[in-house]
Image: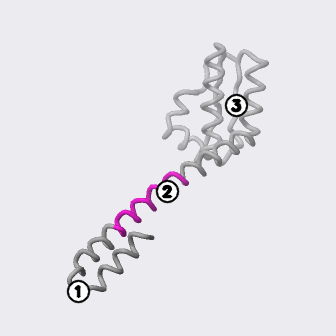
Amino acid sequence: MTVAAIGLTLSTFPPLRSIGLSVLTSAGVVGALLGLSARTALGNAFAGIQVAFADAANPLGDVMQGAIARAPRVQVDLARVSFIDSTVLNAFVNAHGRASDRGLSLALVNPTGHVRRVLSMTGILALLSTPDIGDY
């Protein structure tokens, strides 16, 4: 704000006009850069808060973690699931990590339509592919 005031003041005097305009221009550039920096920092802060709340309120993740804690093999049947989003994908990946850490098996079975496409595109279907029939 002070830099802008100095620039405006200098630009009112004809001999100092070019210096005043230069100061105003640099103040505008600096202001824009600060605004973009603040926007990124605030965006990251809000995204972190959103992820924290999403993880805290993830019943699917809780159910899968409970199943992994009790059984040597977990099979998630997706036959009646018609839509998944990043929260569900995150729950699958986290559950896979926990199951792998414990040496357990986790598989997604019967994905169809949109669900199958999303799981295939993200590589999660290959990671958690249907087990051999003899495994279950």
Residue wearing tag 3: 76
Task: Identify the main secondary structure in magenta.
Answer: helix
Q: What segment is highlighted magenta in the picture? A: 27-42
Residue 31: in magenta span: yes
**Residue under pointer 2:** 38
Q: Is residue 92 left or right of residue 42?
A: right
Q: Does the magenta segment cover residue 106?
A: no
Q: Is residue 44 above or below residue 77?
A: below
Of discs 3 and 1, which sits in the foreground? 1
Mark with earlier residue (2, 1):
1
Counting other residues with Cα less than 10 Å from the Cα at mark 1, is it few (<14), some (14-19), or many (20 or more)? Answer: few
* Residue 13, percent from left and from top: 27, 85
At numbered mark 1, what does the secondary structure look like: helix, strand or loop? helix
Residue lying at 70% horizontally and 45% vertically, measured from the top left: 53
Quadrant for the N terminus in the image: bottom left
Q: Position of residue 90 (x, y in %)?
A: 61, 37
Residue at x 66% of width, y 14% of height:
102
Q: Secondary structure at mark 2?
A: helix
Name the kind of residue labelled 1 in the image: Pro
Q: Amino acid at mark 3?
A: Val
Along the line of sight, which residue is nearer the eye, 78 or 3? 3
> Mark 3 or 1 closer to N-term?
1
Q: Residue at x 52, y 29 (%)?
A: 126
Please tell me whether residue 13 is drawn above or below residue 5 in the rendered image: below
Q: CA distance from mark 2 to mark 1?
A: 36 Å
Q: CA distance from mark 3 to mark 1?
A: 76 Å
The Cα atoms of the two marked residues, 2 and 3, are separated by 42 Å
Please identify the quadrant where the C terminus is shown: top right
Which numbered tag is attached to residue 14?
Answer: 1
Residue at 61% across / 24% down in the picture?
97
Q: Amino acid at mark 2?
A: Ala
